[in-house]
Image (cartoon, helix red, strand yellow):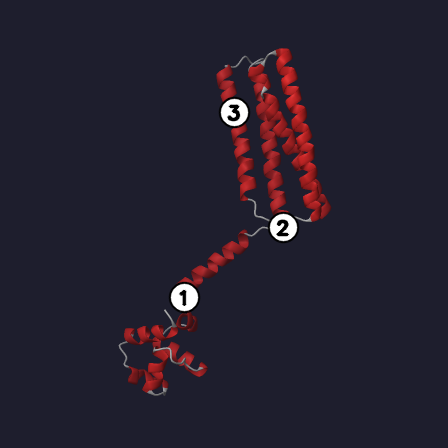
Amino acid sequence: MDLGERLYALRKSKNLTQDEVAEKLKVTRQTISKWETNQSTPDFDKIVPLCELFEIGVEELLTGKKPEEIQEEQEKQENNEEKVLTKQEVKEKSAKVVSSSIFIYIGAIAFLMIAIPVQHANPVVATSIFLLLIGWATARMIKNYMSMPKFEKTKEEKKQEKVIKQINGIIGSICVAIYFIVSFITMAWHITWIIFIIDGLICQVVKLIFMLKGDEEDE
């Protein structure tokens, strides 16, 4: 709804004629007609009298938004501003999630290595608990990386990312070789797959180290 339509609707809501509005504002009826048909707009000195006549605020007259709508928009904007994190805050938050997830990974592996051979726990139950812990840690990291806002990377960060990929690629190749060697020697194919989880754990540790190193350099 444009200004002319709002003026027309407001006048009708007050059951006023164009002549009555013109008389109160000390203008001609033709002027009111032009305002309502958007042939012209009210002069600056007529804005306040119009608001007083229709008992509304200036912003409501000009934008059509009611005070409660304006307040709601302001609150939403303030909430959004509060949720905006700096690049450093995002890195710190991510480091906490990754480090705690690594701890869960280590705990899960330690549990599986102790529960079955040492505590003689039911293999099915122990493995189920192990997988639940691994799944929980993985879900936390996936959620963290997917929810991270996008920042433009610096040359140093791009270089760092390249180094991390190269290191993790080497670690991955070593872990694959170890997996096949250990599996063929022990024939324990049912358990040697844990090596790949350890591989993922080491890769996350590498990322965390570089992340913390970057934080120290920023400071």
Dividing the picture into quarters, in which one does residue 52 lie? bottom left
Sequence-earlier tag: 2 or 3: 3
Residue visible at 62% across and 35% down in the picture: 99
Q: Which residue is mark 2?
A: 152
Q: Nearer the viewer, mark 2 or mark 3?
A: 2
Dividing the picture into quarters, in which one does residue 66 lie? bottom left
Sequence-earlier tag: 1 or 3: 1
Please say whether residue 124 is visible from this viewpoint.
Answer: yes
Residues tagged 1 and 2 counted as in contact (Cβ below 8 A): no
Dividing the picture into quarters, in which one does residue 164 lie? top right
Residue 145: give x, y in percent of width and height: 56, 40
Three-letter amino acid code at disc 3?
A: Leu
Q: Which residue is mark 1?
A: 67
Residue visible at 65% across and 29% down in the picture: 202
Nearest the viewer among 187 and 6 is 187
Please say whether residue 215 is visible from this viewpoint.
Answer: no
As helix, strand or loop, the secondary structure at mark 1 comes to: helix
Three-letter amino acid code at disc 2?
A: Glu
Q: Which mark is residue 200?
A: none
Three-letter amino acid code at disc 1?
A: Pro
Asked if residue 163 lies left or right of residue 125, the reply is: right
As helix, strand or loop, the secondary structure at mark 2 comes to: loop
Question: In the image, is residue 190 above or below residue 40?
Answer: above
Sequence-earlier tag: 1 or 2: 1
Q: Which mark is residue 131?
A: 3
